[in-house]
Image (cartoon, rainbow, N blue to C red):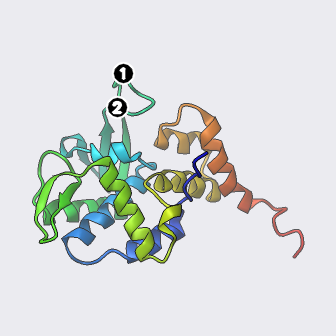
């Protein structure tokens, strides 16, 4: 079957952020990576369909209203925080691109002109391009790497499972637990037993 993409944990994310340029594309890419990761590992479709109208300013950043998701086909919706560095880079992008309504993440022409909504496939291409620029094998990374990276990092840091699941929106623990346990095993007191 298809191989799972490698988790973009915080160390990988930092390398990808460092690979972003200082031009308008780099500003967008940095905001996209941090928004997708820090808001709970958003799916590429959720990133592509993110709207300014669903952002609410709160102390320290934003609350982002997810109107629907793969596990919320009825469109009940829910809020996730976008705080700190992720909020600042998002604000920088919106100001640089003069975006005050509509899609948050837009395509950019080779000349640097802001175009229409970025597609889900475009989100995936950005992650692969930045992985390659950060000297990772782009075949091993994709947009889902940010989602699995968030969960793995939550496990590494000892974030309670229910809190991490509230951020990601996972209804089933099966897929979530594989990444969460992979991260939390590194905190095991038995991990250094040979030392």
The structure residue drawn at horizontal position 11% and vertical position 51%, both measured from the top left corner, is: 100
Residue at 40% in and 76% down: 133
The residue beneath circle 2 is 68
Density class for disc 1 (Cα within 10 Å; few <14, some 14-19, many ≥20) is: few
Instruction: State which quadrant residue 173 falls in.
Output: top right
Residue nearest the viewer, comparing 81 with 183: 183
Residue 124: % across, % down: 38, 55
Q: Disc 2 on helix, strand or loop?
A: loop
Q: Residue furthest top?
A: 74
Q: Mark 2 and 1 residues: CB-CB less than 8 Å, in contact?
A: yes
Label 2 – label 1 distance at C-alpha: 7 Å
Is residue 135 depicted above or below 49 in this figure?
below
User: What x and y, as percent, mark residue 57?
Assistant: 24, 49
Q: Mark on residue 74?
A: 1
Q: Position of residue 56 (x, y in %)?
A: 24, 44
Q: Is residue 188 left or right of residue 10?
A: right
| SS type, badge 1 | loop
On residue 87, which mark appears? none
């Amino acid at each position: 079957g298809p191989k799972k993409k490698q988790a973009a944990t915080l160390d990988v994310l930092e390398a990808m952020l460092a690979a972003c340029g200082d031009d308008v594309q780099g500003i967008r890419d940095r905001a996209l990576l941090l928004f997708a990761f820090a808001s709970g590992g958003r799916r590429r479709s959720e990133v592509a369909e993110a709207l300014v109208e669903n952002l609410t300013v709160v102390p320290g950043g934003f609350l982002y209203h997810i109107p629907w998701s793969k596990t919320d086909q009825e469109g009940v919706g829910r809020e996730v925080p976008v705080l700190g560095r992720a909020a600042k880079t998002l604000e920088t992008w919106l100001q640089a691109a003069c975006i005050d309504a509509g899609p948050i993440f837009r395509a950019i022409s080779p000349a640097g002109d802001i175009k229409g909504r970025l597609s889900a496939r475009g989100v995936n291409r950005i992650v692969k391009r930045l992985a390659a620029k950060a000297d990772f094998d782009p075949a091993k990374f994709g947009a889902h790497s940010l989602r699995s990276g968030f969960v793995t990092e939550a496990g590494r840091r000892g974030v309670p499972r229910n809190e991490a699941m509230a951020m990601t929106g996972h209804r089933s623990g099966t897929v979530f637990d594989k990444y969460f346990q992979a991260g939390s095993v590194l905190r095991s007191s038995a991990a250094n037993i040979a030392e």
